[in-house]
Amino acid sequence: MSSFPQFLSIESGRADRQYWRDLWRYRELFYFLAWRDILVRYKQTSIGVAWALLRPFLTMVVFTVVFGTLAKLPTQGVPYPILVFAAMLPWQFFANSLSESSNSLISNANLLSKVYFPRLVLPTSAVIVSFIDFMISGIILLGLMAWYHFMPSWRIITLPFFILVAFGAAMGAGFWLSALNVKYRDFRYVVPFIIQFGLYISPVGFSSSIVPEQWRWLYCLNPMVGVIDGFRWAILGGDAQLYWPGFSLSIVFVSLLLITGVRYFRAYERSFADVI
């Protein structure tokens, strides 16, 4: 018999007891919430899940025209659409994760006030839903590679590592923003600004190699710089280079973001039901 209905029972006082073990016990809740969010997101839309393909594709077209055709920025020896889309994949994953996870607690207020389960399930399931969009969007990258007859090098086998780093950045930021959004409702307006501003200061439409050498380490304080550069290094091969000092700095920053995000979330987790 499935253990899924167990999460419906209210068990007071378990906020600190066996918390991390409970994350595994309530694993089916991850699947349930993720599947529910996917159904709700594309319900009653004309083209359904194709929106996951259309949004990054149109953004890629705009960036290719502006930065590739008009500004004629360097392409690292690959077609500009592939250069852009190799960065669009991790960026869209990160941006969607921030948007969805920051609202995950507010949108599940009724569940929080009635049922015990580890609250980390909610922002984490939102990141999982964004990862599904990430996988769907990868179809466009495969299509672009086929269109331009582009073959990735051996570096492609390192891509799962950079995906894990992207997961760490998305979950760390998601934990912070979801908790802050409960305490300070102003963050519902801050998050869209962070996403829009982050798009322009991250190397999505251009290569980070155009940043002057003396400023590269400072630029890499943006954790998505290391993630995006890592994706390009793994996918594009050839002339694509990874600025290892800056990438190492991004790894440290992502690790701190994830650790502090979990600690901050756990510190205020007990008060979520009361505040909401």
Image: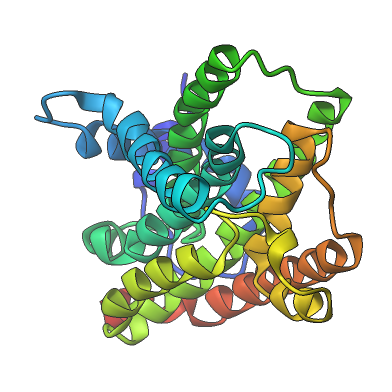
Q: In this view, does 233 lie above or below 45?
A: below
* 197 or 69: nearer the viewer: 69
Lateral position of residue 67 relative to residue 145, left or right: left
Lateral position of residue 212 relative to residue 123, left or right: right
Is residue 50 in view? yes
- Residue at 41% across, 59% down: 101
- Residue at 27% across, 66% down: 106
Locate residue 255, reporting x and y percent: 76, 67
* 1 or 52: nearer the viewer: 52
Is residue 117 in view? no
* 261 or 32: nearer the viewer: 261
Q: Which colour scheme is used?
A: rainbow
Locate residue 125, reporting x and y percent: 46, 46
Locate residue 248, reporting x and y percent: 87, 65
**Quadrant in which the C terminus is drawn:** bottom left
Q: In this view, does 97 lie above or below 133?
A: below
- Residue at 38% across, 35% down: 57
